[in-house]
């Protein structure tokens, strides 16, 4: 199987898959390849925090032009995968010189499926791009074509709790990945002082309570012919039984009243509102309420929210961390590489990521009391 993810989260996803019991784990670009059974596939979709989708390869072949692609795709017994009354859609990604447009590759495979069904059954299943029963993934590298079934459907960052958001919320998978990278544990105070939509705080609460993030989702694999309802319900029940109710210290703060309303609503939808201490506060004007902890910051930057003097804003972030958060650890993500330099703190770790399609840098700061 192949799990896809965001750039920079491959190692975290590998660790998650190891913990779930995956075998032969191999790092790819924005993806991880591994071996497992149906039980693992069900468990991974329900509980993985840093994966976007899980693909199960069903066929591979070589094709150097559209005629070869069509004929090879048409040979595959699609009637064993799809019912006539089921809808389907096709996603395609391509690299190399043989094929120029991913949409064209998807169209040729769609034609092959439709023509095979007409020959075998006299009619063909319908395409539904919005809410298909079966999602087929085509991955072309040079002349190598891999066809997979997408077990997930709607990508796993769509947790379902964020009905409302502010201008530029951090992706749920990215927020979870940053928290897991930091090594945060449920007994460490968690500070989210520019909370925005509350994604960092909600993902922390899900991690701290061992709540699988996708428990209330439906997946494409539930439409597969060999879907095992009994095993799926057993896996889901086992995951639910592992949920705990710890005494978490998660402090979500924001200066904007409209953001506080959004956070409260999102946290309630996620079932995590009781674990999040939510208050209106200005990061620059308030002190932390514990002696230590970890601070997570996704501050505004040029592309995201207009700030009159972004360099001064980032300089004030650095001053506030130095003056008020000695003894803490801070993790900050930003796409403004120049503004980051104005923080005036040395990053102990620097990790390149993508945030909302923008290149971003994640920095870890150790905030020492006195001199290091």
Image (cartoon, rainbow, N blue to C red):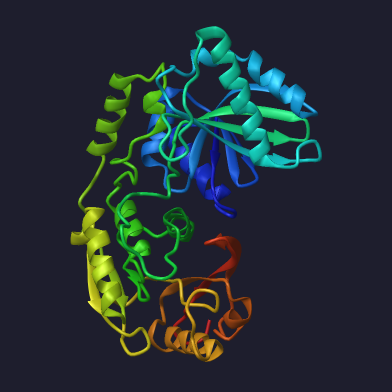
Q: Residue 109: image x %, image y %?
A: 63, 27
Near-viewer residue (11 or 360): 360
Occupied quadrant, residue 233:
top left
Query: Quick check: can you spot residue 62?
Result: no
Taking the view exactly as shown, the residue that stands out farthest to the top is: 120
> Does residue 250 appear to the left or right of 226 in the view shown?
left
**The N terminus: image quadrant:** top right
Query: Quick check: can you spot residue 19?
Result: yes
Q: Is residue 357 above or below residue 56?
A: below
Q: Residue 232: image x %, image y %?
A: 32, 26
What residue is drawn where x is 51% and y is 13%? 79
Q: Residue 239: image x %, image y %?
A: 29, 36
Q: Is residue 250 above or below residue 30?
A: below
Q: Is residue 238 above or below residue 177?
A: above
Near-viewer residue (39 or 355): 355
Q: Is residue 291 above or below residue 44?
A: below
Taking the view exactly as shown, the residue that stands out farthest to the front is: 122
What residue is drawn where x is 40% and y is 37%? 131
> Does residue 329 appear to the left or right of 343 in the view shown?
left
């Amino acid at each position: 199987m192949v799990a896809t993810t965001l750039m920079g989260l491959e190692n975290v996803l590998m660790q998650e898959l190891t913990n779930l019991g995956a075998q032969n784990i191999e790092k790819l670009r924005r993806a991880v390849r591994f071996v497992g059974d149906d039980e693992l596939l069900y468990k991974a979709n329900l509980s993985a925090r840093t994966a976007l989708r899980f693909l199960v390869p069903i066929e591979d072949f070589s094709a150097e032009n559209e005629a070869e692609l069509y004929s090879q795709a048409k040979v595959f017994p699609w009637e064993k995968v799809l019912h006539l009354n089921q809808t389907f859609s096709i996603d395609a990604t391509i690299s190399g010189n043989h094929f120029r447009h991913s949409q064209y590759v998807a169209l040729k495979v769609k034609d092959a499926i439709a023509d095979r069904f007409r020959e075998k059954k006299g009619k063909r299943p319908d395409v539904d791009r919005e809410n298909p029963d079966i999602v087929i993934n085509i991955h072309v590298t040079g002349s190598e074509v891999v066809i997979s079934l997408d077990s997930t459907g709607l990508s796993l960052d769509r947790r379902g709790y964020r009905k409302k958001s502010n201008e530029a919320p951090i992706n749920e998978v990215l927020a979870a990945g940053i928290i897991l990278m930091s090594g945060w544990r449920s007994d460490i105070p968690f500070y989210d002082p520019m909370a925005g939509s509350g994604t960092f705080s909600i993902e922390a609460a899900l991690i701290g309570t061992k709540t699988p993030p996708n428990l209330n989702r439906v997946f494409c694999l539930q439409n597969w012919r060999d879907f095992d309802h009994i095993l799926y319900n057993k896996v889901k029940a086992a995951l639910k039984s592992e949920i705990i109710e710890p005494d978490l210290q998660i402090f979500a703060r924001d200066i904007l009243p409209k953001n506080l309303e959004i956070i409260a609503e999102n946290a309630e939808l996620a079932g995590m509102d009781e674990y999040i201490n939510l208050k209106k506060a200005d990061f620059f004007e308030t002190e932390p309420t514990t002696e230590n902890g970890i601070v997570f910051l996704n501050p505004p930057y040029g592309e995201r929210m207009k700030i009159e003097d972004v360099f001064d804003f980032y300089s004030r972030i650095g001053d506030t961390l130095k003056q008020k958060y000695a003894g803490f650890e801070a993790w900050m993500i930003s796409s403004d590489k120049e503004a980051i330099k104005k923080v005036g703190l040395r990053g102990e770790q620097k990790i390149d990521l993508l945030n909302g399609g923008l290149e971003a840098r994640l920095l870890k700061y150790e905030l020492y009391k006195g001199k290091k």
